[in-house]
Amino acid sequence: MNSRNAGLGVFLYFLLAFQALMAQSKVDFSIQIGSKNINQDENFIISITVPANGNTPESITYKFPELPNFQKLGISRGKSSNYQNGQIEQRVIYSQHYQPIGVGQFYIPSEEVVVNQQVQKFDPFYVSVSPSNGLATSESNSDEVSISNELLAKANQPFLLVSSNHIRPFVGQGFTLKFSLFVPESNTQELAFDRNDIQLPKLIQQLRPRNCWEESFGLQVEKVSQVEIKRKKYTEYRFFQATYFALNDRPIQIPSLSLQILKKEKVAGELKSIPIIFKSPALLIQPRSLPNHPLASKVPVGVYELKESISKKQAKTGENLVYTSSVIGDGNGILWDSKGLDSDYFLDFNRLSTQSSVYPSMDKMFGDKTEIIQIIPKQPGKFALKQYFYWIYFNTRTEKFDTLRSKINLEIKGQPSDSRVNTEREMEGLYRGIENLRSDEVVWNRWANWRQLANLTIFSIFVVLVFLVWKTKK
């Protein structure tokens, strides 16, 4: 009997543990459908947003559906954090990219998206695909620098390449590494991949720089696209893509990588698969130090723009205004600090929300820091928000430290919270509102007394000097 109770207790214990484990694995997620009007060069995107809730991105499993008339490409990952009411909510965004295989209007039936074995369906819709604008080209000349003339000379031969859009980035500036196989349009060989599921993880581990911050594009299958390099057409099979931010100026050495491909040939009348090996050239990336500056290690590095808005530019004292700022750029936006909200005699500030996200766009990784701030004016007058809201960064385009400043000016009317001060006219600094200070206050009377005493002292000294001079002459 005791053994039966003990066995029942063990069973209940494991049952409760299993239920607790299942409860932890449950994830609430939402589905976002991308633009439904694209051209043939663009990707259609379905995204899911998953609250982190203590889970790491690696612990979240997901599955996107197959879509008719579209080919699955890679999955990119974004992150966002939302600060609201003193709490931070972390979220992860996964985006599945689909490449259209034709032109027209395609019906997408209701399909399932699975996250941690939980299923959600989206409603059916149509995607309109217009003709392409032409072949995609290499995004910059810096990619072509990575391709040696020796490789390009073999016009009819495939080649393996690890390329970077920057060879000499600044420390903290993002540079994107792409690991691809290029097959020329004129290629006549019949090729097939050979156990990429085993080869690629090892190769990707070799090419990852160690002294860098990584933001991966999350490709889970090779991304196939038509490209043009130096007026030659290729099919690119992209296996890996990530943006890196160098943490110091130490050289980054990407070693030569070897990928085995199967070439199908007829040998003695029988079709056989013959392994051939492609090797990528080694790649050296030399980060550059930033110019000497007190903030050199504390600010983002890249090209940024400020998008801002405010609920009203003309308001009355005591009225609530909502100011929204979004700083967007291709640098590591994680380094953006939340703006200090030091209220002063004229304006009160209260942070309502802070959101930061990192997301891929085309062949770059972008960061977005958005803040929503409540402003309550306490004094009438004209106020330039550039005095309060500005962001310092290193501009890689000008190669100088730069500042984004608010361009919004407020005009506040009404009664001041302190009747002794009125800033109806726009004044700055120490003299703001001084026109309304009373000149007959006690402090001025005290100053007048001290001035009279000083005058009397100087007059007394003058009389003594005259007396001494007169006495000396006698």
Image: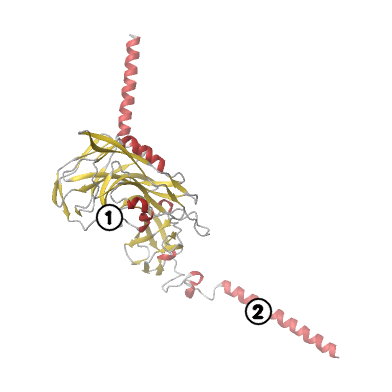
Q: Nearer the viewer, mark 1 or mark 2?
A: 1
Helix, strand or loop at mark 2 = helix
Tell me where residue 55 sits by quadrant: top left
Amino acid type, label 1:
Lys
Q: Which mark is residue 390?
A: none
Residue at left offset 49%, top offset 52%: 249
Residue at left offset 47%, top offset 46%: 211
Residue 83 in sight in this render: no
Q: Position of residue 264 (x, y in %)?
A: 24, 38
- Tell me if 100 is positioned left or right of 388 in this view: left
Tell me where residue 452 sits by quadrant: bottom right
Q: Position of residue 138 (x, y in %)?
A: 31, 55
Q: Residues within 10 Å of mark 2 (few under 14, many from 20)?
A: few
Q: Which residue is mark 2?
A: 452
Q: Is residue 22 above or below residue 207?
A: above
Helix, strand or loop at mark 1 = strand
Q: Is residue 15 above or below residue 358?
A: above
Q: Earlier in the sequence, mark 1 or mark 2?
A: 1
Amino acid type, label 2:
Gln
